[in-house]
Image (tube, rainbow, N blue to C red):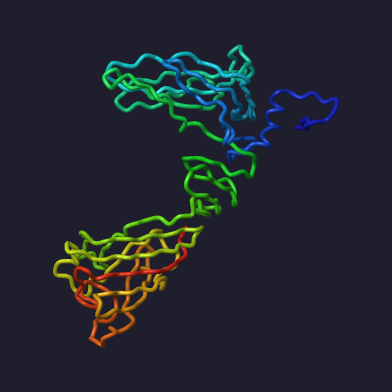
Amino acid sequence: MPVDPWAIDTLAFSGLEARNVDSAFVMGNGSALGSQSGVRPGDPGLTVTLAGTTINCSAGVAVVAYAGQGVYRVALPTSVSPGTYTAAHATLNRLDLVYLRVWDNSVDASGLNKGDVVYLAGTPSASPVAPTPAGTQIYVPLATISVLSVSNGSTASVSTAVRPYTVAPGGILPSASTPTGLYVGQYWDDGTNLRRWNGTTWDTYQKVPLASTAWTPTWTTSTGLHSPSYGNATIDCRYYKLGRLVNFWMNIVFGSTTNFGASATTGDNWQFTLPATSAMLTYPVASVTYEAGTSRGVTGNAVTTSDGLNLQLNVSSAAVNSVALQAGVVDSLSPWTWASGNRLNVVGQYEAAS
């Protein structure tokens, strides 16, 4: 069916035609002509606040998308108030909703053609949830208001966690919840990491603020028997993930209450969980130093397990004082009988599975 392309002189455009064309300038939602509703990242507009029991919303702009109708661009030139919030329930808390609504008579038969901010009280409950506007509603949520019961103090507070954001096509979308991956190369900022959609999953492209992260590896054995436990060991393990590259460090000094596994055997090979699943299976990914004290030290390497979840440690050198040692995979009895004050150092890097 022929359509009127935007913008050619002498052609008349319906509101629907104009809204559909506007969809070209807003991030898609995975459907034809579909768009992502929301406010602009960094825009302080349409901020909901409380003055006593009065609800206020500052001036601002937003895009409100509706299936089959393109996008409605809405601008509030001045602050507005949708009224006061409903009084607190005697014993139950409540979660209310404040949203930006568009009335379009051609769509909702409301008899109105306008945009405004609306307040909707929730239902008091032991586990309150925000209400959903009923009927044909072209809207975007701006905030929730948590109203505590009279028995809990009757206080109210505003949260903007429900407020979505939208960007131009190709823009980086900030969102606390995982968005739908639409195309390879799409970027999403989860508030901590910059993520990239690879067609299957979200890769961590860059970690913010580029600092290493502490983690405590789970310490088990290959047999699942005679499991050790850290007790009062000093655990200083950190990793840094850039995309699928993981750099990691482990510095563990075993303590006086460390349990190396009751009745452990040399078949109970130690395993330590990795900070992220490895794509490199049964592969050497780290160098290791074992220290039993000031008189001797042993080196080795660390190899990923066949499922990519753990490290196993190997001994590859003798003690500096030539004392005979048990070679092979490290366990509670190899390369010696481990004790308080012994140290384990691991430095490595590998490719993560995602």
- Quick check: 337 above or below 41? below
Which residue of the protein is positioned furthest toward the right in this rendering? 10
Q: Where residue 136 sits: x, y (%)?
A: 54, 21
Q: Residue 241 versus residue 78: which sits nearer the camera?
A: 78
Q: Residue 153 versus residue 139: which sits nearer the camera?
A: 153
Residue found 37% across the figure and 75% down from its top: 301
- Quick check: 62 above or below 106? below
Which residue of the protein is positioned furthest toward the bottom in this rendering? 322
Residue found 39% across the figure and 69% down from its top: 347
Q: Where residue 241 sits: x, y (%)?
A: 46, 58
Q: Residue 50 versus residue 82: which sits nearer the camera?
A: 50
- Quick check: 274 above or below 27? below
Along the horizontal axis of the image, is 104 left or right of 217? Answer: right
- Quick check: 320 above or below 203? below
Along the horizontal axis of the image, is 116 left or right of 156? Answer: right
Which residue of the protein is positioned furthest toward the left in this rendering? 263
